[in-house]
Structures are given as C-alpha cells and as structure tokens.
Image (spheres, rainbow, N blue to C red):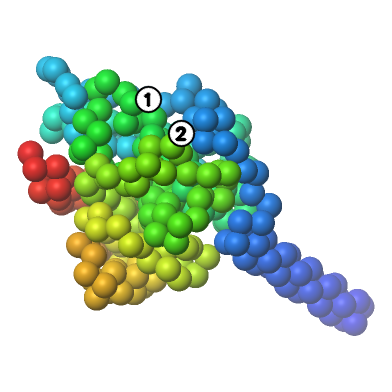
Amino acid sequence: MIARVRNWVLLGALAALIAAGLIGCNVLSRYHGFGASEMRPEALSARLKPAYRSFTPQGNGPWPTALLFSGCDGPKDNMDRWAKELTDEGYAVLVVDSHGPRDYDDAQLWRLVCIGQLLPGPERAGDVAVAIEDARAMPFVDPERIVLIGASHGGWSVLDMLSLHGQDKPPHNLTRWPETIQENGLEGIVGMVLLYPYCGVASQVYSHGWQEDVPGLFLLVEDDSIVNEDSCIEVIERMKEAGRPVEAHLFKGTTHGFDQEEKNAFSTLEFSPEATREAAELMRQFLRKVTKR
C-alpha cells in the first residue's frame, strides 16, 4: 500500500514537472514569436476598433490623449477610474480592449493570458502599435501629445512595443509596423506610465531595453506577488545609464493591482484607495510635465 502511494506521488510530481516544462517551453517559444498569428495592421485594427471606448473632456479638442491598456484579466473598473481621472484633468482617453475582440473574456482563457500562454507582451505589442495609428487619425486626439498607460500585462505590452521598435522588428502578431509608425516612428508619443508591469526574462524589454527617448514613469509595488519588481528596477537602472528619461516610485504596504476593485473571488490582491490616490497624483504631475500642460 505504501509503495503504491509512493508511486502515485512520484507520478504526480513527474506530471507536474512535465506540465511546468511544457508551459516554460511555450513561454520561450512565444518570446521568439513562434506560434503567433500574424495579421496585417489594417486587419488587426478592424478587429480591435469596434471595442475601443473613448472619453473626452468638456470643451473643444483636439486634446492630449492617453491610450489605456488593461491587465491580463481584461478591462476592469480601474480603466474607467483612470479614464475619469484623466478626463477631469483635460485629457482625452482611448481604452483599448485586447480581450473582448478575441473572446478572451472567459475566465479560463484570460488565465492563460496571465501565465503567458496566450497573447504575451511581444504579441499584444501589436495592439499598442495599431492603437497608436488609429488614435493619430481620430479628430479629438492631438497626435503630437499621446501618452501610453499600461497596467500589469498592458505595461508589459507597451514596453515590449518600444523594445521591438528599437530592434527594428514588428510585434509578433503583425506582418509589419502600421504605416504611420513606418513613416514617422513613435513621433508624438510623449510619455508612458507603467503600473506594476512585467519586466522579467520572458519580456523583450528585459533583454533589449528600448531606444526611443520616451519619458517613462514606473509605479511599482514592493514585494509584488505577481511580477518581480526587481526585474523592472534592473531595467530602469540600465535605461537610466543609457540616458533614457525614466522615473520610478515604489509603493509599500499594498499589492499588485492596487487600483482595481473588481477582482476574482479567490484573489489575494487588494484594492487600495490610498495607493490609488497617490498613484493618481504622481501620474498627474508626470503627465503635466510631458504634455506641457
């Protein structure tokens, strides 16, 4: 009986190791772009555009505009919260939904996004690039004052878009860069805000950094249980040494996703109104500086 139990334990451990190995192999292959479905930028735009949500301040535009990219569980209440904060400050906002157009709203599918098995940062980077091109053509957008704001997986995607652009490689889900980025690069992208992003070894930014002098504000969490903030700190230090304009703030006593109240029933993450207010003030000061408002 004891031998039988031992065998089952060994088989279970072996199965767990095999599963972990398969997940790791898939993450590695995704890092290199294997398995990604490439689309023309126009086709990806046609898929994403119906799910865009735009918000504008009172008065007449065009306005400096923030493009918002959610975490791996899709757009939640924090996207609406940031949209209100920003429009109250005089910015237009475009919330980009990468999940709904792909039918990744289902809990089991977004969990695969969260562990890097679906739509990792180098692929979703194409959504960032296409959204930039689409925003440039919108009448309420000032194309010379666009900021990118990404939370968690969205921050990873923003960073990897910049990294791939510096490597002269298109995002893994695109056959080529969108036309306006081919012609004008990232002109008019005046800043980026990254809330607790992933910067680990499976990201392009960890290995390659970025080349553009786009000012960045990293809002990190100490002892982050979801992503290792030390990887981002390492990237930040390397980028500072390379002369990139980067700022960072480390929140203590809170968790990953502190600005998001809507969470899974079994989540250990907590919404922190205090940290959210502090993040809003840091973001406000940073955006005023980079948009020259």
Total labels: the figure holds 2
The dot on residue 53 is 1
Identify the mark at residue 97; answer none if there is no mark: 2
Query: Dot 2, crowdedness within 10 Å: few (<14), some or many (≥20)?
Result: many
Which residue is painted at 62% across and 65% down in the image? 28
Regarding residue 143, the answer to whether it shows in the image is yes
Give me the disc on residue 7.
none
Dots 2, 1 in contact, CB < 8 A: yes
The quarter of the picture where residue 131 lies is top left
What is the crowding at mark 1: few (fewer than 14 residues within 10 Å), some, or many (at least 20)? some
In the image shown, does 230 or 132 lie closer to the viewer? 132
Q: Amino acid at mark 1?
A: Arg
In the image, residue 122 above or below residue 22 = above
* Closer-to-camera residue (41/3): 41
Front residue of this view, candidates 258 and 213: 213
Name the secondary structure under disc 2. loop
The tag earlier along the polypeptide, 2 or 1, is 1
